[in-house]
């Protein structure tokens, strides 16, 4: 009798546990609210499976109903969203880690509030996936490899090849050079101070009265130069006016320069004078009579 009771208790506990698990799964999938289907497409290796949650802006709104593996490298994920939740247009779907044990979830990210929503059987665009722990660990491992290589190189250069001794020697030489430069700068400062003092003495020795007299002489010379410049401008203006009159044929001189008939007469006179001079040279007795008493 006792054996039978123990078996019945075990069977009852097992049935209760199965019912509890099935009830939890049923409630997780919406219970009596079956909701409406939406689809999303991802690449292989997303790690999704049936029953994983679907979050809209961080709120659990449904679950993954099925995952269809296509031969072109695409996962077609069918999601079941509860009827009292509406997904705004412009929302993108990404796969994100759910905890630290490799579980995944589908996260729906609305771009902005939108009164227009997706209808049943619509397909959401996939967004940029969030880096997972595995990706972070892989990158961290790569960084650690580079750090290890760098530390090994530093050890080789600084320890094995006496790099530290060379650095110490360089620092010592740099310190000596800085001290020498400091001494040179101090000496230059002293020389500069002496030069400034000499300049002050030379400036103080200059007679201010002579300086004023020289400045007045310069001012007078500048005034004379200004007057001379004015006279030159007036003379130039007069010459320009005279040349303009000559070019225009105004006055006696202008007519002399521009009258063609006068030029012809002068040319004829010059020709006659040349002929007379030649005849005089040839027959001087014709023009000069010399008699002696």
Image (cartoon, rainbow, N blue to C red):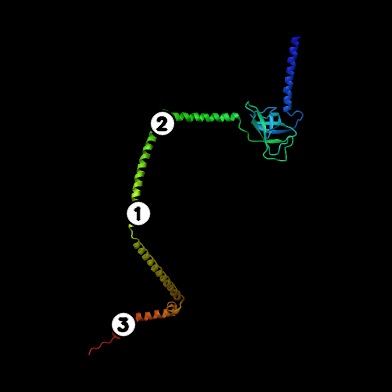
Q: Is residue 60 above or below residue 22?
A: below
Circles 3 and 2: CB atoms closer than 8 Å: no
Residue 52, picture quadrant: top right
Residue extending furthest top? 1
User: Which of pointers 2 and 1 lies earlier in the amino acid sequence?
Assistant: 2
User: Which-is-in-front pick, marks 3 and 2?
Assistant: 2
Residue 114 lies, in percent from the top left, at 71, 40
Q: Which residue is depicted at the point 40% across and 80% down?
A: 266
Cα distance between the residues tagged 3 and 2: 118 Å
Residue 105 vs residue 216, the one in the foreground: 216
Label 1 CA crowd tier, 10 Å (few <14, some 14–19, many 20+): few
User: Which-is-in-front pick, marks 3 and 1?
Assistant: 1
Q: Is residue 90 above or below residue 257?
A: above
Label 2 CA crowd tier, 10 Å (few <14, some 14–19, many 20+): some
Residue 257 vs residue 29, the one in the foreground: 29
Residue designated by label 3: 280
User: Which-is-in-front pick, marks 2 and 1?
Assistant: 1
Residue designated by label 1: 200
Residue 205 vs residue 278, the one in the foreground: 205
Residue 227, picture quadrant: bottom left
Residue 267 lies, in percent from the top left, at 39, 79
Cα distance between the residues tagged 2 and 1: 53 Å
Residue extending furthest left? 293
Residue 283 vs residue 247, the one in the foreground: 247
Residue 61 lies, in percent from the top left, at 71, 32
User: Which of pointers 3 and 2 lies earlier in the amino acid sequence?
Assistant: 2
Judge from the rendering whether residue 30 lies leftward or rightward of residue 198; answer left or right.
right
The quadrant of the picture occupied by the N terminus is top right
Circle 1 SS class: helix
Cα distance between the residues tagged 3 and 1: 88 Å
Circle 2 SS class: helix
């Amino acid at each position: 009798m006792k054996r039978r009771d123990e078996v019945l208790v075990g069977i009852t506990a097992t049935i209760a546990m199965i019912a509890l698990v099935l009830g939890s799964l049923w409630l997780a999938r919406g219970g009596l609210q079956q909701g409406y289907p939406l689809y999303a497409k991802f690449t292989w290796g997303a790690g999704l499976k049936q029953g994983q949650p679907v979050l809209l802006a961080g709120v659990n709104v449904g679950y993954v109903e099925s995952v269809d593996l296509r031969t072109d490298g695409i996962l077609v994920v069918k999601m079941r969203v509860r009827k009292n939740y509406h997904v705004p247009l412009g929302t993108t779907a990404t796969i994100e880690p759910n905890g630290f044990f490799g579980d995944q979830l589908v996260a729906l990210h609305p771009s902005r509030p939108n009164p227009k929503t997706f209808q049943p059987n619509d397909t959401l665009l996939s967004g940029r996936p969030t880096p997972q722990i595995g990706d972070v660990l892989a990158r961290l491992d790569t960084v650690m490899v580079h750090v290890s290589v760098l530390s090994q190189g530093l050890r080789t250069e600084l320890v094995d090849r006496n790099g530290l001794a060379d650095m110490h020697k360089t620092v010592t030489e740099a310190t000596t050079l800085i001290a020498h430069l400091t001494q040179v700068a101090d000496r230059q400062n002293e020389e500069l101070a002496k030069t400034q003092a000499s300049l002050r003495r030379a400036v103080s020795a200059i007679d201010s009265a002579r300086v004023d007299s020289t400045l007045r002489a310069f001012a007078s010379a500048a005034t004379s130069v200004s007057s001379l410049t004015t006279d030159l401008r007036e003379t130039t203006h007069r010459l320009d006016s005279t040349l303009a009159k000559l070019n225009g044929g105004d006055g006696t001189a202008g007519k002399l320069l521009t009258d063609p008939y006068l030029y012809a007469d002068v040319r004829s006179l010059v020709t006659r004078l040349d002929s007379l001079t030649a005849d005089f040279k040839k027959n001087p007795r014709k023009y000069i009579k010399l008699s002696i008493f």
